[in-house]
Image: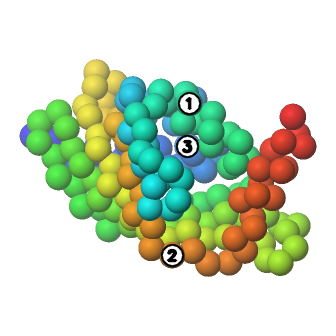
Amino acid sequence: MADTTDIATALARWFAAVDRRDWAAARTLMASPFHLDYSSFGAGPASDLDPADVLAGWRTLLPGFDATHHQIGNLDIAAAGETATVACYVTATHRIAEAAGGQVWTVVGSYTIPMVHTDAGWVLAGCTFHFKYQDGNTDLPARARERVAQRQ
C-alpha cells in the first residue's frame, strides 16, 4: 500500500523547488515523459515532454518575478500500488515589486497530478491545471518574460 504521506511530501517538495527556482531539485521529482496540460488556461494542447523542456520553458518566465508562491491544499490522494493521482487546489501568487499597475498576479485553480513510485521515491508524472480565475495585474507575465530576457 502506498504511503500517502510520502506522496504529499514529494508534491510539496516539487512546488517548493519550483518557487525557489531550484531546477535540479524539481527535475529529480519529475518522471519522463512529463504530461503537461495548461489548456484550460489557454496554453495550447496538452503534451508529453521531457522534464528538462518543461523546466526550460518555466525558466523563461518564473525568474522574472521577484517571488512566486504556489500554495496547494485539499489534497485528495488516490493511490494504488506504484501509481497515484493527486487532486489539489492551488493558489499561485506572482510578485514584481516595481510593477506599474499593480505588483501581484494571482492565479487560482486546481491540479490533477499523476504520480509514480520509482527507486528514488514518488515523482510527478505530469500535471493538468484546471483554471478557475485570476486576479491582480495580468500584465505581469509579459513583464516577467521581459525581465528574464534583459538578464541574458
Rate crowding at label 2 as few (under 14), some (14 to 19) or many (20 or more) other CA atoms within 10 Å.
Answer: few
Q: Looking at the picture, which amino acid does disc 2 mark?
A: Tyr
The residue sitting at 55% across, 28% down in the picture is 52
Quarter of image, res 126: top left
Which numbered disc flags the more N-terminal residue, 2 or 3? 3
Which numbered disc flags the more N-terminal residue, 1 or 2? 1
The residue sitting at 24% across, 61% down in the picture is 76
For marks 1 and 3, give the CA distance. Answer: 16 Å
Quarter of image, res 148: top right
Mark 1 and mark 2 in contact? Answer it, CB < 8 Å: no
For marks 1 and 2, give the CA distance. Answer: 27 Å
The residue sitting at 53% across, 53% down in the picture is 43
Rate crowding at label 1 as few (under 14), some (14 to 19) or many (20 or more) other CA atoms within 10 Å.
Answer: few
Residue behind mark 1:
53
Q: Looking at the picture, which amino acid does disc 3 mark?
A: Ala
Residue behind mark 2:
133
Say which element carries label 3: helix
The quarter of the picture where the C terminus appears is top right
In depth, the one of 32 and 142 nearer the eye is 142
Residue behind mark 3:
17
Asked if 100 appears above or below 33 in the picture, the reply is below
Asked if 138 appears above or below 33 in the picture, the reply is below
For marks 2 and 3, give the CA distance. Answer: 24 Å
Q: Nearer the viewer, mark 2 or mark 3?
A: 2
The residue sitting at 19% across, 38% down in the picture is 83
Asked if 91 appears above or below 116 in the picture, the reply is below
Which numbered disc flags the more N-terminal residue, 1 or 3? 3
Mark 1 and mark 3 in contact? Answer it, CB < 8 Å: no
Say which element carries label 2: strand
Please provide percent x and percent y for residue 18.
57, 45
Q: Looking at the picture, which amino acid does disc 1 mark?
A: Asp
The quarter of the picture where the N terminus appears is top left
